[in-house]
Image (cartoon, helix red, strand yellow):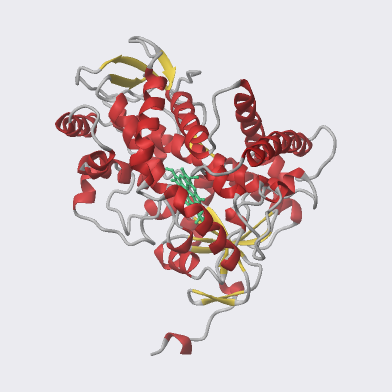
């Protein structure tokens, strides 16, 4: 039977909790933002792969798994991408800062993607290798045996330096550092569950603090962009590519319309890559055999391998796949129906919001045997489809920075592991945080020693253990160690 002859079920037939009051919806939003993994797992366990529920934005769908990922990523005329940053009033900094490639669709999206594509081509990685090596060496220059360090902070800083240098052509001056602080403050506010639950601009509220942070941050970015435009934008970095963007009738685009693009691209680049690098090192430190295998491979490549060789190294590739499967830096994303249409066997109405989850898909036992197990060897035999394995998204909106991210991560690992043995401080509490990206809530405290290949995992606590099976010879005590 032809699929189009099957009558679609109304949206109201999608299972889910019963309708609730506005306050109930706000409370659901707080619960979702506090721990999306718990929330999504709860809904899926109760209602299945497609659920209708309410939060402060109104009625939402939660769609889990390849059957729904496929249309959400391929039917880009029906499923539009939306800004993931909270709105502000028209003509406010907050409003301008949330405009980015993520808020463009169809023809406008294609034009912006086309503009940015050359910056991120795989062929650029050979050019970038030297700078990435330099930033990795700098990051390690202050490391000493016996030190306890916050791995998350160190890796975040390493990636920040790569992004500010390669994608934005910025030096490491005090002005750049102040930009970094401004971005961190604003991002913290934007993803706070309390700001998202009460988005009203009343003095002294968290939302009001976010608006003030947005004003300050926009001023800093505009200053930077105006100066760069005045100097001429001939570079092959992302900021120059954005500043060269023209309107359809070939006019210069005012910096005020590009400021959000510049900011969000910067944030996305360093948050996701910094978190993935941190998680990958964390997993390698907790799974000594995988680390031994990576070390063997790196040793066989010799010192300073070309990026082509590093990129072709099979064990490192399997570790990256397994790390981004288990702990994808983008754990979930959203779409908005641009018109009435069909979604699986249901009707979907214009303006319906849909959440889908890379994390939930990657943890489906129907696709991955023992999904919580860190098992790089599984990649020798499996070849999931783009709707089953999508750490960098899929379809026409696939991540633009995936080559750069993998290049930074692989180079950093190749510099760190042969020299340093990284042990998570025993009894550390490793919890997740989901904002713009999935990262560790309070960092990851590690102790450093010279690499001697006598590798042992550490007993740890925290809700990371719901996401990755980490077994220990004896149960770990729940102790929180500030990093
Ligand atoms: C390990 C690091 C990274 C991960 C896991 C990651 C993941 C993703 C995912 C899942 C999407 C699709 C989102 C959706 O469908 O709603 C995406 C899109 C995107 N990513 Fe990444 N990303 C990473 C690094 C980067 C870097 C370094 C950049 C560089 C600036 C970047 C730029 C982008 C852009 C511009 C898009 C939007 C593409 C579009 O809408 O056409 N990402 N990324």
Q: At x 75% / y 45%, what residue is drawn? A: 199
Number of numbered discs visible in the structure rendering: 0
The location of residue 80, given as percent across then percent down, is 58, 64
108 left or right of 215?
left
Q: Describe residue 186's horizontal placement relative to residue 454 as left or right.
A: right
Q: In the image, is residue 483 above or below residue 467?
A: above
Residue 419 location in percent, x, y? 27, 20
Q: In this view, does 245 lie to the left or right of 431?
A: right
Looking at the rendered image, the quarter that the N terminus falls into is bottom left
Depicted 394 relative to depicted 321: above or below: below
Residue in the picture at 50% in, 32% down: 165
| Camera-side residue of 361 and 182 | 182
Q: Residue 348: in sight, yes or no?
A: yes
Which residue reaches farthest right?
203
Question: Can I make out residue 35 in this image?
Answer: no
Q: Residue, x 51% and y 52% (percent of image)?
A: 116
Q: Choose top left, top right, bottom left or bottom right for residue 324.
A: top left
Q: In this view, does 389 lie above or below 200?
A: below
What x and y, as percent, mark residue 429? 45, 25
Reply above or below: 156 against 167.
Answer: above
Q: Which residue is drawn at 71% across and 52% down?
A: 24
Q: Which of 180 and 280 is in front in this view?
A: 180
The answer to which of 110 and 79 lies nearer the viewer is 110
Q: Where is residue 103 in the image (x, y as percent from the top left)?
A: 62, 57
Q: In this view, does 206 lie to the left or right of 156?
A: right
């Amino acid at each position: 039977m032809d699929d189009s002859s099957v009558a679609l079920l109304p949206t109201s037939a999608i299972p889910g909790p019963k309708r609730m009051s506005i306050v109930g919806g706000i409370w659901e939003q707080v619960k979702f933002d506090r721990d999306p993994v718990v929330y999504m797992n709860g809904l899926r366990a109760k209602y299945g792969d497609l659920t209708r529920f309410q939060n402060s934005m109104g009625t939402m769908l939660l769609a889990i798994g390849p059957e729904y990922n496929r249309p959400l990523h391929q039917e880009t005329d029906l499923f539009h991408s939306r800004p993931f940053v909270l709105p502000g009033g028209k003509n406010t900094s907050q409003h301008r800062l949330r405009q980015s490639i993520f808020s463009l669709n169809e023809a406008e999206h294609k034009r912006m993607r086309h503009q940015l594509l050359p910056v991120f081509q795989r062929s650029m990685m050979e050019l970038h290798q030297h700078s990435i090596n330099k930033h990795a060496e700098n990051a390690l220059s202050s490391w000493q045996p016996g030190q306890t360090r916050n791995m998350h902070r160190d890796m975040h800083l390493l990636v920040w330096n790569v992004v500010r240098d390669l994608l934005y052509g910025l030096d490491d001056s005090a002005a750049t550092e102040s930009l970094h602080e401004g971005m961190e403050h604003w991002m913290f506010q934007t993803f706070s569950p309390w700001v998202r639950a009460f988005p009203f601009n009343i003095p002294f509220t968290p939302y009001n603090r976010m608006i003030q942070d947005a004003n300050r941050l926009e001023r800093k970015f505009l200053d930077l962009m105006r100066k760069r435009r005045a100097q001429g934008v001939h570079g092959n970095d992302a900021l120059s590519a954005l500043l060269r963007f023209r309107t359809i009738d070939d006019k210069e685009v005012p910096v005020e319309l590009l400021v959000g693009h510049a900011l969000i691209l910067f944030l996305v680049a360093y948050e996701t890559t910094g978190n993935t690098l941190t998680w990958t090192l964390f997993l390698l430190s907790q799974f000594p055999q995988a680390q031994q295998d990576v070390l063997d491979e790196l040793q066989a490549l010799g010192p300073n391998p070309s990026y082509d060789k590093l990129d072709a190294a099979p064990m490192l590739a399997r570790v990256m796949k397994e790390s981004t499967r288990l702990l994808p830096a983008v754990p979930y994303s959203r779409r908005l129906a641009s018109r009435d249409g069909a979604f699986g066997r249901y009707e979907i109405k214009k303006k319906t919001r849909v959440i889908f989850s890379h994390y939930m898909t990657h943890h489906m036992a129907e696709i991955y045997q023992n999904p919580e197990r860190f098992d790089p060897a599984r990649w020798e035999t499996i070849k999931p489809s783009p709707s089953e394995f999508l750490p960098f998204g899929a379809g026409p909106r696939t991540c633009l920075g995936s080559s750069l991210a993998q290049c930074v991560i692989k180079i950093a690992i190749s510099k760190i592991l042969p020299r340093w043995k990284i042990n998570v401080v025993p009894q550390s509490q490793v919890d997740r945080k989901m904002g713009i990206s999935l990262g560790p809530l309070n960092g990851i405290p590690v102790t450093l020693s010279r690499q001697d290949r006598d590798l042992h995992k550490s007993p740890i606590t925290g809700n990371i253990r719901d996401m990755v099976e980490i077994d220990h010879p004896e149960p770990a005590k729940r102790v929180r160690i500030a990093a």
